[in-house]
Image: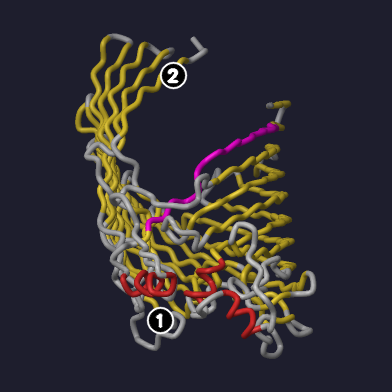
Amino acid sequence: MRYEQGALSARVIGEHEHRRLDGTPYRAANADREVIDAIDAALGTPIVVRGDGRSIDSDLLNPRDDGDITGVTAQAELDLGFATLTGIAGYRGHRFVYEEDYDGTAEPFGIYRQSQSGTYASGELRLVSSAKGPLSWTVGLSAYRETVNARFTDEADERYICLAGYEYASCDELTQDLFGTTYAASPDGMFVQPNQARNITTGFSAYGDVNHWALPHLQVGAGVRYSWDRKRFALDVPQTTSSLGNIWTFTYRTDGFVEDARSWQGVTPRLYLRWKPQARVSIYASVSRGYKAGGFGTFTLAAPSPIDEFGLVPAGTRPDAFDPETVWSKEIGIKASLAQGRLHFDIVAFDYLYSNLQANFYNTETRAQEVINIGEVRGRGIEAALTARPAPWFDLRTSLTWTRTRTRGDRGCTRDDCGGLTSPEWASSGVATFRHAFGADEANVSVEWMWQGKSREAWDWRGIVRRDPALSSNLLIGYRWGNRVEANIYVQNLFDGLWYQGALNGGDLDPASVWGVSQPRNVGINVRIGAGN
């Protein structure tokens, strides 16, 4: 919906997404003999992951990623002559249910479920100069409030916990030894550990930016943003209904919700320099600081004294907090348009340094997903992008990136180089399109590719599974009749390649695994029909 009256214009946009997808598919590695043999020996049952590399061998018949998201955004702009005042207000609500079999086998060793609802409301006021002279500027204020309520469950076979996890001959022997009680199996033999979390986050920021053409071919710019965030987080770990008690995902319980509230603030400056020796060539450099607020882990607690195993947490226990992360980023690059606009290229070299990078880490000793801060992460690289149209019937867009990352202070690592992040060292993507006109109609053929090389692994990587270099290619053959009708035949994963989105290290009783398997080659047709002239 849109409204215009004189210098004022406004619009309201509503949207709704109804999503019904599958949870992330995992495939454990038969090659992880250390873990699988230990489980085999404890349970007396051979564990074999069946099928080929594209198959998923799972005991969860209906993995889910179901969500409903509704949002409304209102924006108004007022032309003040010297500047434009923009106001933006938005609201978004969501509900989703997620389920996955994260152990990657057909045995009931690890099923994760999450149900969540939440809201997000935000507003912004921004004043942007008309930029009719050498000086341009922007100032603004923004604020937000977010609420999240979530329930989690972790499920596993009780025999697996007793025999493999605690190395008892039976679950009855475990309960007699630890609690002096008789074991009573759950109706389906499954151990279910729930926990609940709720979070209220509020934030405010103020920012300003100024750019000035100090010389006819030289522009300098500077900006700064102040951010303040506050999070109130609460976590509840109730007693499980299993006669084993809280013995697996959590080895303790809380008496209702334990909560904490903290606030963080950060200042992020930016400096920018651009030189234009020619109208179609720009050489630029920038230095900027980034900031991300801290928070609380959903599956860990911080206690003032040691927690009694399998018992109630002591008074004063709070959610486990992690620190804010900061990053200093430096860039220097060149952008140019040549050959009467038929060739555009952009080359940039970058260097960034993270302090206290926030990362997810599955601790195999506590069997808990933790949010940790990695002391220092340095990344350097070069990115190049090219757009070319040497002839009316052909155009090409492509990019190539090289990145090298190095971490320090990663968990217990004392080395100077603790390995890299999961991002690939080399990556490339592009699309080439051929066109031929038939009067007002047009036929086209497009070839698209995406390639990722290997990544530097973390210092404690076990090396059983890897995310190997992968090439994905797609083909599109289309025909357009005027501006009304367009039909396309597409072939995705043209060469039927096999790759994975990620690989997990495994360890303890979790086999190394891969997740996010590529779809096999598939062919389809889509037709678009316009309603205009």
- Quadrant containing the N terminus is top right
Residue 309: quadrant of the picture: bottom right
Residue 78 in percent (x, y) is at 70, 37
Q: In the image, is residue 496 above or below residue 511?
A: above
Q: Earlier in the sequence, mark 1 or mark 2?
A: 1
- Residue 120 visible in the snapshot: no
* Badge 2 amino acid: Arg
Residue 327 in percent (x, y) is at 49, 70
Residue 66 in percent (x, y) is at 58, 43
* Badge 1 amino acid: Arg
Q: Pointer 1: what residue?
A: 408
Disc 1 element: strand
Q: 501 or 42: nearer the eye?
A: 42
| Residue 321 included in the magenta stretch of the image | no
Question: What scheme was used to colour the molecule?
Answer: secondary structure
Q: Pointer 2: what residue?
A: 528
Residue 38 in percent (x, y) is at 38, 75
Disc 2 element: strand
Q: Could you give the CA–CA distance between mark 1 and mark 2, rounded to whole angstroms?
A: 52 Å
Mark 2: few/some/many CA within 10 Å (<14, 14-19, 20+)? few
